[in-house]
Image (cartoon, rainbow, N blue to C red):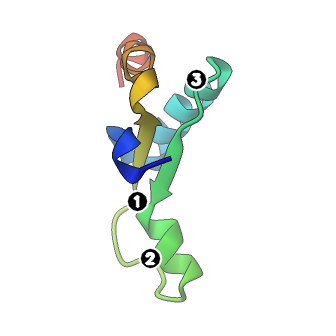
Protein backbone atom coordinates (compact mmCIF):
# COMPACT_ATOMS: atom_id res chain seq x y z
CA UNK A 1 0.00 0.00 0.00
CA UNK A 2 1.10 3.47 -0.83
CA UNK A 3 0.97 6.41 1.56
CA UNK A 4 -1.09 8.31 -1.02
CA UNK A 5 -3.81 5.66 -0.76
CA UNK A 6 -4.92 7.01 2.63
CA UNK A 7 -6.92 10.18 3.24
CA UNK A 8 -7.33 12.17 6.46
CA UNK A 9 -11.00 12.02 7.47
CA UNK A 10 -10.84 13.33 11.05
CA UNK A 11 -8.54 15.31 13.28
CA UNK A 12 -9.57 16.22 16.78
CA UNK A 13 -9.76 15.14 20.38
CA UNK A 14 -8.92 11.64 21.50
CA UNK A 15 -12.44 11.23 22.93
CA UNK A 16 -14.15 11.93 19.59
CA UNK A 17 -11.55 9.95 17.68
CA UNK A 18 -12.08 6.91 19.90
CA UNK A 19 -15.81 6.92 19.15
CA UNK A 20 -15.18 7.24 15.41
CA UNK A 21 -12.55 4.46 15.44
CA UNK A 22 -14.98 2.19 17.29
CA UNK A 23 -17.74 2.78 14.73
CA UNK A 24 -15.39 2.40 11.76
CA UNK A 25 -14.10 -0.93 13.04
CA UNK A 26 -17.67 -2.12 13.64
CA UNK A 27 -18.34 -1.34 9.97
CA UNK A 28 -15.31 -3.39 8.91
CA UNK A 29 -13.27 -0.29 8.03
CA UNK A 30 -9.70 -0.39 9.27
CA UNK A 31 -8.48 3.14 10.04
CA UNK A 32 -4.89 4.25 10.49
CA UNK A 33 -4.63 6.32 13.66
CA UNK A 34 -1.92 8.86 14.41
CA UNK A 35 -1.80 10.24 17.94
CA UNK A 36 0.82 12.98 18.33
CA UNK A 37 0.70 13.00 22.13
CA UNK A 38 1.19 9.26 22.42
CA UNK A 39 4.04 9.34 19.90
CA UNK A 40 5.78 12.10 21.86
CA UNK A 41 5.31 10.21 25.13
CA UNK A 42 6.73 7.00 23.71
CA UNK A 43 9.74 8.88 22.36
CA UNK A 44 10.42 10.29 25.82
CA UNK A 45 9.39 13.87 25.13
CA UNK A 46 6.32 13.87 27.33
CA UNK A 47 3.09 15.53 26.32
CA UNK A 48 4.19 18.56 24.31
CA UNK A 49 0.99 19.13 22.35
CA UNK A 50 -2.71 19.01 22.90
CA UNK A 51 -4.23 15.61 22.39
CA UNK A 52 -4.99 15.68 18.69
CA UNK A 53 -5.63 12.41 16.99
CA UNK A 54 -5.73 11.97 13.22
CA UNK A 55 -7.69 9.23 11.50
CA UNK A 56 -6.89 8.10 7.98
CA UNK A 57 -8.80 5.62 5.83
CA UNK A 58 -8.07 3.97 2.52
CA UNK A 59 -9.44 5.83 -0.50
CA UNK A 60 -11.82 2.95 -1.21
CA UNK A 61 -13.49 3.47 2.18
CA UNK A 62 -13.90 7.26 2.15
CA UNK A 63 -17.62 7.41 1.33
CA UNK A 64 -18.62 4.92 4.02
CA UNK A 65 -16.32 6.55 6.56
CA UNK A 66 -17.69 10.04 5.97
CA UNK A 67 -21.24 8.72 6.29
CA UNK A 68 -20.40 7.16 9.65
CA UNK A 69 -18.86 10.41 10.90
CA UNK A 70 -21.87 12.42 9.70
CA UNK A 71 -24.22 10.04 11.50
CA UNK A 72 -22.24 10.50 14.72
CA UNK A 73 -22.38 14.30 14.33
CA UNK A 74 -18.81 14.66 15.56
Q: Position of residue 38 (x, y in %)?
A: 53, 68
CB within 8 Å, label 2 to label 3:
no
Tell me which numbered mark, 1 or 3, is placed earlier along the sequence: 3
* Residue density around tag 3, few if under 14, some if 14–19, many if 20 or more, within 10 Å: some
Label 2, on which residue? 47
Residue 57 lies, with reference to residue 44, above or below; the image says above
Q: SS for tag 2?
A: loop
Q: Could you give the CA–CA distance between mark 1 and mark 3, rounded to whole angstroms?
A: 20 Å
Label 1, on which residue? 51
Q: Residue most toward the front? A: 1
Label 3, on which residue? 23
CB within 8 Å, label 2 to label 1:
yes
Asked whether, in this view, residue 32 is left or right of residue 69, the answer is: right
User: Which mark is nearer the camera, 2 or 3?
Assistant: 3
Tell me which numbered mark, 2 or 3, is placed earlier along the sequence: 3
CB within 8 Å, label 1 to label 3:
no
Asked whether, in this view, residue 27 is left or right of residue 31, the answer is: right
Q: Could you give the CA–CA distance between mark 2 and mark 1, rounded to whole angstroms?
A: 8 Å
Q: Nearer the viewer, residue 60 or 55?
A: 60
Q: SS for tag 1?
A: loop
User: Which mark is nearer the camera, 1 or 3?
Assistant: 3
Q: Position of residue 19 (x, y in %)?
A: 54, 31
Amino acid sequence: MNRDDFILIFEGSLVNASRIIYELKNSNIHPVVKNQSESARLAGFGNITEEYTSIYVHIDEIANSKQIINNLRV
